[in-house]
Amino acid sequence: MQLLTAFAISLAGQGSLVTAAAIEPRSANSIPPPPKSEPVHLKRLPLPPGISDDAPGACTAKINPRGTGCMPVKSLRAFQSGEFLPDGKHVLALVPYIGAPLAPDPASIYNGSQIIIIKTDGSKFSNGDKWKCITCGVPAENAVGQTPTYDYPQAFDDGKRILFGSNIADCGDHLLISDECTPDQLHVYPIHWDVSADGSGAGGSIRELRLHPDNIHLGFSSFTIGAKLGQFAYFGRLKFNPKPTTGLPLAPRYDLIKV
């Protein structure tokens, strides 16, 4: 009200005609009633078994007979739920694995931050679990330049790719939920944003990535550091670059263009 009064005084001082109309308050009869209550059903989704000991080997065969990992009882912000896959029957999640045995034990791949797919219809994957780790055990040569961020997992509509952190995981011709999508078939590509005139260097730091519904564009933000800390939002187009000649890494990646 004080701002409106000051604005009116300013206009009046410039010789402008200012008029004000009184606004009648709404009567109780003009406000529509709230909609009828609808039932909301909550379903608890299965996760890897929880343990409190994070020492190597603490996730024993007694705790998880299938050897597909354990997560901490209290994961706090290290756990993060993600989006549904396009079939509506699977959901993504970021989980922190702990207690894995040391290599060369096959279960050693269930360690650290990873992305899993959880079934929501009560069915199981072929190994007997109701979840499947997508990023566990991916060979190093399939993930050159991968960034260490795993947050905000989001699914592409093709069911074959996911966005997590500033990376895109791609299982080629295979659906992520299929038995054919194994660690050796999955590739993880970093997302690169050119911020130098000649395209050199590691590119800009990007955060809070959000995939556009068209699965082509990407929204993100980036900090600016100078006299004071700032942050700006950006919108760009994803383009796969199989053989980059500038910028880092010089490995297959997704470039952000027309930002």
Image (tube, helix red, strand yellow):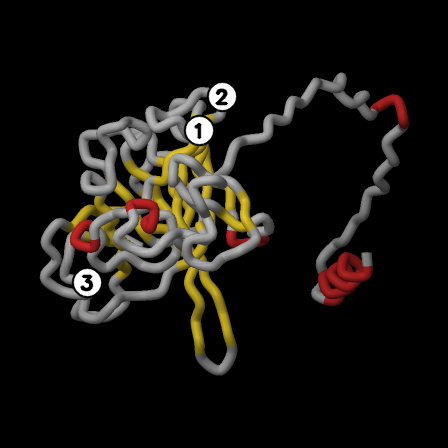
What type is the residue that disc 2 sits on? Gly
Q: Are marks 1 and 2 in contact (CB under 8 Å)?
A: yes
Say which label, 1 or 2, has the lower sequence index: 2
Q: How far across and down, in percent of the image, does residue 109 sit? A: 32, 49
Q: Is residue 221 left or right of residue 108?
A: right
Instruction: Indicate the secondary structure of the residue bearing disc 1.
Output: loop
Up/down of 229 relative to 120, above or below: below
What type is the residue that disc 3 sits on? Pro
The residue tagged 2 is 122
Give the Cα distance between marks 1 and 2: 7 Å
Give the Cα distance between marks 3 and 2: 41 Å
What type is the residue that disc 1 sits on? Lys
Q: Quadrant of the N terminus?
A: bottom right
Instruction: Indicate the secondary structure of the residue bearing disc 3.
Output: loop
Say which label, 3 or 2, has the lower sequence index: 2
Up/down of 230 relative to 151, above or below: below
Instruction: Indicate the secondary structure of the residue bearing disc 2.
Output: loop
Mark 1 crowdedness (10 Å alpha carbons): few <14, some 14-19, many ≥20? many
In depth, the one of 19 and 124 nearer the eye is 124
Q: Nearer the viewer, mark 3 or mark 1?
A: 1
Determine the residue positioned at 34% across, 46% down.
107
Q: Are marks 3 and 1 in contact (CB under 8 Å)?
A: no
The residue tagged 3 is 249
Mark 3 crowdedness (10 Å alpha carbons): few <14, some 14-19, many ≥20? many
Say which label, 3 or 1, has the lower sequence index: 1
Q: Is residue 223 visible?
A: yes
Up/down of 133 relative to 232, above or below: above
The residue tagged 1 is 130
Determine the residue positioned at 32% across, 59% down.
147
Q: How far across and down, in percent of the image, does residue 204 sit? A: 32, 65
Q: How far across and down, in percent of the image, does residue 145 sit? A: 23, 59
